[in-house]
Image (spheres, helix red, strand yellow):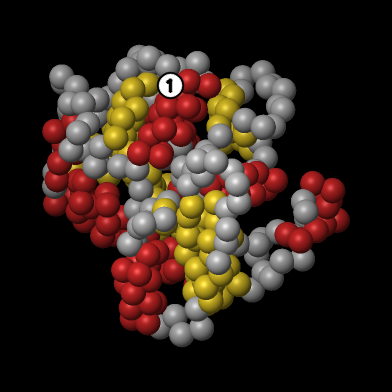
């Protein structure tokens, strides 16, 4: 493990962060994501194994990405200065050893808020999921007929829409959200799912995240989307502080991880009715059976299962 010191410089009130970065062989990426999700759900994944666009789209992609090592992938998360860095590292090394990650490389890198918030923007371009087009706030995009534009600046929050988990659940939202539906988004991150739901016609929307920075970023995205007042976003540990709507919500969505979905399941029925659709994503395929079993044991039935590249999302209802 290497430690690198980083000085933020004279930026005024700048938050300092430590980046915890683990690199493994590409074929073990999903396993690493599962392990690191036990510590932090806001993960940054660097996987260049499927980028081979030089002949067609070379001008759009930085040369360093095209030439990056495709045999290894990295997963990172960020700890604010004063956080439990040593505890995280101790737990992480123990979990890596327990799962036989003998060749994993662990780095601790100092980083400032501006650097993290801006360094990856070059790789984030407009992309389409069904009729929804996710457009970075710093990019220009001319909408085509029938497209719904969602402008996002994820900032320090998780949720650009590019990850399989987010794509899966946005696809399900387009299938199940009806005009006027009430919507509850648990673990909102950047606010992307609540914003997509509202853009698809949902009426009253509530979004929650345990991370105050995510709440701040989500509220900025909600305001920039012209949805202030239509989406209420606040801090909550899963459902503990969430608004309990009379008669239950029409749509509940949670793009988190398998263990947290399992933890939430016994309580979520209090926010539902017999017609409510619960959309759950962030589940690696190896854990899908565990999540399904938990839902079934708590009085739910599986309506639909969607899969993409080793990840799955579920649509469920109360039995």
Q: Residue at x 16, y 21 (%)?
A: 247
Q: Circle 1 sits on which residue?
A: 198
59 relative position to 291: left or right = right
Q: Nearer the viewer, residue 232 or 133?
A: 232
Q: Position of residue 283 (x, y in %)?
A: 37, 54
Question: In the rendered image, which quarter is residue 311 located in?
Answer: bottom left
Q: Which of 215 and 227 lies nearest the eye of the viewer?
A: 215
Q: On the picture, is 315 further left or further right than 309?
A: left
Residue 166 showing in the rendered view = no
Q: Residue at x 27, y 25 (%)?
A: 250
Q: Is residue 214 above or below residue 174?
A: below
Task: Report x, y in % for residue 86.
Answer: 35, 69
- Return the residue nearer the eye: 118 or 163: 118
Which quadrant holds residue 204?
Answer: top left
- Indicate the position of residue 223 as horizontal and vertical percent values: 48, 20
Mark 1 neighbour density, 10 Å: few (under 14) some (14–19) many (20 or more):
many
Identify the residue shown where x is 46% and y is 85%. 102
Residue at the (33%, 78%) spot, across then down: 94
SS for dot 1:
helix
- Up-down: is 132 above or below 48? above
- In this rendering, position of residue 247 left or right of residue 149: left
Counting every numbered tag in the picture gives 1
Q: Position of residue 68 (x, y in %)?
A: 71, 66
- The C terminus sits in image quarter: top left
- Residue 158 visible: yes
């Amino acid at each position: 493990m290497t430690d690198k010191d980083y000085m933020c410089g004279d930026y005024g009130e700048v938050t300092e962060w430590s980046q915890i970065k683990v690199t493994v062989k590409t074929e073990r990426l999903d396993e690493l994501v599962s392990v690191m999700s036990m510590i932090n759900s806001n993960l940054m994944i660097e996987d260049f194994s499927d980028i081979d666009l030089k002949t067609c789209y070379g001008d759009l992609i930085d040369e360093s990405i095209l030439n990056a090592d495709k045999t290894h992938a990295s997963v990172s998360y960020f700890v604010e200065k004063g956080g439990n860095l040593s505890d995280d590292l101790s737990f992480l090394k123990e979990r890596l050893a327990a799962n036989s990650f003998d060749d994993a490389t662990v780095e601790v890198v100092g980083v400032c808020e501006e650097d993290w918030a801006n360094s990856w923007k070059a790789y984030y371009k407009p992309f389409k999921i069904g009729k929804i087009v996710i457009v970075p706030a710093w990019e220009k995009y001319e909408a085509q007929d029938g497209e719904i534009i969602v402008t996002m600046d994820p900032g320090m929050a998780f949720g650009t829409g590019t990850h399989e988990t987010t794509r899966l659940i946005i696809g399900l939202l387009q299938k199940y959200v009806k005009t006027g539906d009430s919507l509850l988004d648990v673990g909102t991150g950047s606010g992307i799912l609540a914003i997509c739901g509202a853009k698809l016609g949902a009426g009253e929307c509530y979004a929650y995240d345990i991370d105050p920075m995510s709440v701040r970023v989500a509220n900025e995205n909600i305001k920039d989307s012209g949805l202030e007042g239509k989406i209420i976003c606040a801090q909550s540990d899963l459902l503990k502080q969430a608004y309990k709507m009379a008669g239950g919500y029409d749509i509940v969505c949670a793009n988190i991880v398998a263990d947290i979905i399992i933890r939430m399941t016994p309580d979520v029925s209090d926010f539902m009715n017999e017609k409510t659709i619960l959309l759950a994503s962030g589940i690696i395929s190896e854990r899908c059976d565990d999540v399904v079993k938990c839902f079934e044991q708590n009085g739910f039935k599986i309506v639909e299962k969607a899969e993409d590249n080793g990840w799955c999302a579920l649509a469920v209802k109360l039995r």
